[in-house]
Image (tube, rainbow, N blue to C red):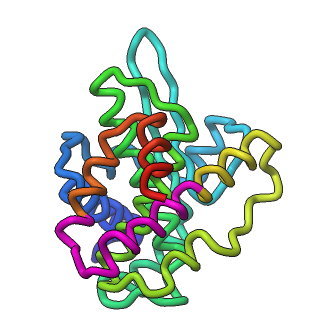
Amino acid sequence: MTPPRARARSLLARLQLGLEALYRVETQLAIDAFVIDGDQRDRMHPARAPREQLLLHEADGELAMALFVDAAALTNLEQNDPAARLDDENFTDFCLAVEGVSHFVYMALRAAQSRPVSQLELELQAEVDKFACCFLVAGTAASLRRRLYGDVAYAHDLDADERERYRTANREAGRYVAALERRFLAREQTVGLLAELRRFYRMDLPEKLGRIAQLA
């Protein structure tokens, strides 16, 4: 019998493969090897302990990464497979898992390219990735923008700068997705949508914000 944690990690691995296929990129890393549990994270003494967290440590030009995703969320996704049905039972936890995998893949790629990444850039791309993954899994964009970028609650322990960063990422991603809906989804141009998402993925933060402003 496969241990519960192994099953949970395989779900993250599938998400990684899906994101890399979507954007036609390869990290050449197995996300399972970087996933840690709550006890391991506690030993790192992070300033915060959210339900999803990518922990980074750079020394001597080398970047070490560790990914934590709430075990209860992963168990729920194993029991309520989003590939079978994405609904109220698993939507929030699916977005949590996508966010963690998004952070991991994006940071790994940028590190391999020796490209700097701001926290806002990381969060903005994760917000877009949530839409892309939910759309591809659910097969429809109906109500997605409202659920992802509408009435959003933020953790109470965020400081002012962190809260503003998350708000900005969510707002700009919402503007971008609204433009995608008008430009591609309303015309049922899925091929054009995927091409746009892939171009956006390769942009740096100023280019991403400029693209959003252009389309909005």
* Most frequent secondary structure within the magenta stretch: helix
Q: Nearer the viewer, residue 79 or 138?
A: 138
Q: Above or below — where is 139 with respect to 157?
A: below
Name which residue lies at 75% across and 49% down.
163
Q: Is residue 50 left or right of residue 187?
A: right
Asked if the magenta segment contains residue 109, the reply would be no
Name which residue lies at 32% across and 77% down.
185
The segment highlighted magenta reads 172-193
Quarter of the view holding residue 29: top left
Q: Nearer the viewer, residue 24 or 34?
A: 24
Q: Position of residue 165 (x, y in %)?
A: 67, 45
Q: Above or below — where is 97 with respect to 29?
A: below
Q: Above or below — where is 48 with respect to 59?
A: below
Name which residue lies at 35% across and 76% down.
135
Name, please, the residue furthest toward the top.
60
Q: Position of residue 97 (x, y in %)?
A: 46, 64
Q: How many numbered circles are shown?
A: 0
Asked if the magenta segment contains residue 187, the reply would be yes
Q: Is residue 51 left or right of residue 215?
A: right
Q: Is residue 213 left or right of residue 184?
A: right
Q: Above or below — where is 179 with respect to 138?
A: above
Q: Position of residue 57 (x, y in %)?
A: 51, 26
Q: Position of residue 175 (x, y in %)?
A: 53, 61
Q: Nearer the viewer, residue 18 or 152?
A: 152
Quarter of the view holding residue 128: bottom left
Q: Quadrant of the N terminus?
A: bottom left
